Amino acid sequence: MKDALWIDELIEDKRICSYYQPIVSIDHERVHIVGHEILSRGLEEDGSIIPPFKMFEAAQIRNKTFALDRACRLEVVKNASIIDRQLIFINFIPTAIYNPEHCLASTFTLIQELNIKPEQIVVEVIETEDVQDIEHLKNILNYYRSHGFKYALDDVGVGYNTLNRLLEVEPDIVKLAFEFTNGVSKNEKQKKVAQEMLTITHRMGAKALAEGVETEEDLKCLIEMGYDLFQGYYFAKPHPEPLKEIHSIYV
């Protein structure tokens, strides 16, 4: 446990920064940025980057998951204020929130102070497989929606139950996991999962987002299936500043 003590200082000192990765739509082969996922990174005292998995591993050991999740969320909201009109994807860990009205109060207050429009915010649920109490998750998501926010489910397709859970929590956006996006053009099993998720998503009236797009072949495959939104290194890696536009045209 002593090996993870550094996370306490990181949270206390607010040594967290944000990176932006664009989320795009494609219209007549032209790429349009519709939003940004804002990703948290830790900072060593010398300014070098600490990856998120390392931070949350240490936080779990120290029983500081909620504190770190909250610190990241507030930093992301603060850095989201520079995004004008586009969607703002913010990650949160549902198992870290025991009472939405209490735990999320500071987040909502900051959003109001910064005059960020609620309809811009897409709350992205990560680690859905760890959520044992689906009613608790629904309670949190309903609380977000009642404040005018949208919400997305991340990493869908990883684990059999996630496809079934889509119908229960009724998200606005569903993100196909990297494991099924990457190489989908050459793998029939991945295609089957991608198509199944797309069918359920559209049946609910939600948008399907493929994350982890890295090749033109996979992109073409997903476009032909009918996916609405895309994210991945094919377009841009996470960047310290939000990109204004992407000049590449898919052919």
Image (tube, rainbow, N blue to C red):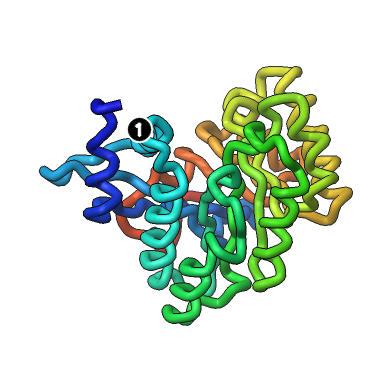
Residue 186 % position (x, y): 66, 19
Q: Residue at x 79, y 39 (%)?
A: 165
Residue for badge 1 = 58
Q: Is residue 245 above or below residue 177?
A: below
Query: Depth check: 17 or 215 in front?
Result: 17
Q: Position of residue 240 (x, y in %)?
A: 30, 54
Residue at the right extreme, as displayed? 203
Residue at the image position 62 percent from the left and 72 percent from the top:
119
Q: Is residue 150 left or right of residue 233?
A: right
Task: Give the number of marks.
Answer: 1
Outermost residue toward the left? 46
93 sits to left or right of 246: right
Q: Amino acid at mark 1?
A: Ala
Q: In this orientation, does residue 220 appear?
A: no
* Whether residue 11 is visible: yes
**Figure quadrant of residue 179:** top right
Query: Which residue is painted at 66% across and 27% down in the image?
Result: 158
Q: Nearer the viewer, residue 8 or 221?
A: 8
Give coordinates of residue 55: x percent, y percent.
35, 37
Q: Residue drawn at (67%, 56%), measured in percent from left and top?
A: 140
| Residue 74 on image: x %, y % | 41, 62
Image quadrant for the N terminus?
Answer: top left
Badge 1, how many Cα within 10 Å: few under 14, some, many 20+?
Answer: many
Q: In which quadrant of the rendered image does the C terminus lie?
A: top right
Residue 70 lies in what quarter of the image? bottom left
Residue 95 lies left or right of residue 36; in this view the side is right
Q: Nearer the viewer, residue 112 or 155?
A: 112
Secondary structure found at label 1: helix
